[in-house]
Structures are given as structure tokens and as C-alpha cells.
Image (spheres, rainbow, N blue to C red):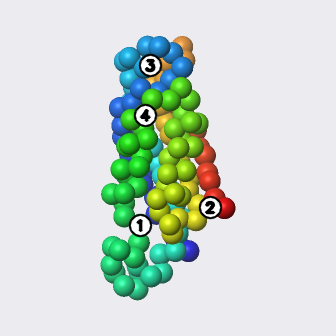
């Protein structure tokens, strides 16, 4: 078993419950961790035998481009897509952070974390 983690994927997206958030947008970061078997790729040294980071990044950026009211919703979609498209992924965990959230205080970011295990 092994872990692949993409850290600090930066996007500009339009998530949030307020109308202004859908118009103005905000900066986000996403971390994605998947548990998968890395033994075959460790032995063969072939990209076809592992999870392509480009594919994972594409899933994250495409899902972050779809407006959601809640970070939980976009995180759920990312987890579902990873498990649907990456056959060898056994578990996925995603952290979605909104930078400088409009919550009436001096807050650097707000982050949610969600995981999903292959059934």
C-alpha cells in the first residue's frame, strides 16, 4: 500500500452561499491524498502502472470550476470522481480551503476535509 498526495493545488473559483461570491470569486487551495498499491509501479518504473498525477490534478481543477454553495459539496464530487476514474484508488481524502473567507473577521482560510473509501 502507498499514498500519493497532491498538495496546495491553487484555483480561483466561485463557491459560496452569497451572491457576491458567485460573481467575484475567491482563491482556493486543495490537497488530495489517495491510498493505492504502489508496488507494481515501484517494480516496473512505468507510468501506466501507477496513478497519473496529471489525471488527479485535472479532476480537482474541473470540479473546482463547477460552482457549489458549500465546500463540502465540491469535496464530495472530487472524492467520487477519483474513485470512479482511478480503479486502483482504495481511499481518497480531500482538503478544500477558501482563502480569506468573507466571514467578518481576519481569517486566513477555512478548510474542510472529507474522505471516501471504495465500497
Is residue 33 left or right of 10 when viewed as pictured? right
Kindly tell me whether residue 3 is visible in this rendering.
Answer: no
Using the numbered discs, state the Cα–Cα distance from disc 2 to disc 4 in whole angstroms. 24 Å
Label 4–label 3 contact, CB within 8 A: no
Element type where label 2 sits in the image: loop
Q: Residues within 10 Å of mark 4 (few under 14, many from 20)?
A: few
Count residues near mark 1 (Cα–Cα under 10 Å), then give few for <14, some for 14-19, many for 20+.
some
**Circle 1 is placed at which residue position?**
51
Of labels 1 and 2, earlier in sequence is 1
Q: Earlier in the sequence, mark 4 or mark 1?
A: 1
Disc 2 target residue? 118
Q: Nearer the viewer, residue 87 or 113?
A: 87
Residue labelled with disc 3 = 21
The front one of 119 and 101 is 119
Residue sitting at 50 percent across and 66 percent down? Answer: 87
- Residue lying farthest to the bottom in this orientation: 43
Indicate which disc, 2 or 4, sits on the residue closer to the N terminus: 4
- Return the residue at label 4: 66
Q: Residue furthest front?
A: 84
Amino acid at each position: 500500500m502507498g499514498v500519493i498526495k497532491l498538495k496546495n493545488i491553487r484555483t480561483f473559483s466561485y463557491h459560496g452561499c452569497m451572491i457576491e461570491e458567485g460573481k467575484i470569486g475567491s482563491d482556493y487551495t486543495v490537497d488530495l491524498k489517495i491510498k493505492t498499491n504502489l508496488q507494481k509501479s515501484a517494480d516496473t518504473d512505468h507510468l501506466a502502472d501507477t496513478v497519473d498525477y496529471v489525471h488527479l490534478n485535472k479532476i480537482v481543477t474541473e470540479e473546482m470550476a463547477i460552482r457549489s454553495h458549500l465546500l463540502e459539496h465540491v469535496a464530495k464530487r472530487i472524492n467520487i470522481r477519483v474513485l470512479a476514474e482511478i480503479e486502483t484508488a482504495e481511499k481518497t481524502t480531500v482538503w478544500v480551503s477558501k482563502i480569506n473567507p468573507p466571514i467578518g473577521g481576519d481569517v486566513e482560510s477555512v478548510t474542510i476535509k472529507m474522505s471516501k473509501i471504495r465500497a
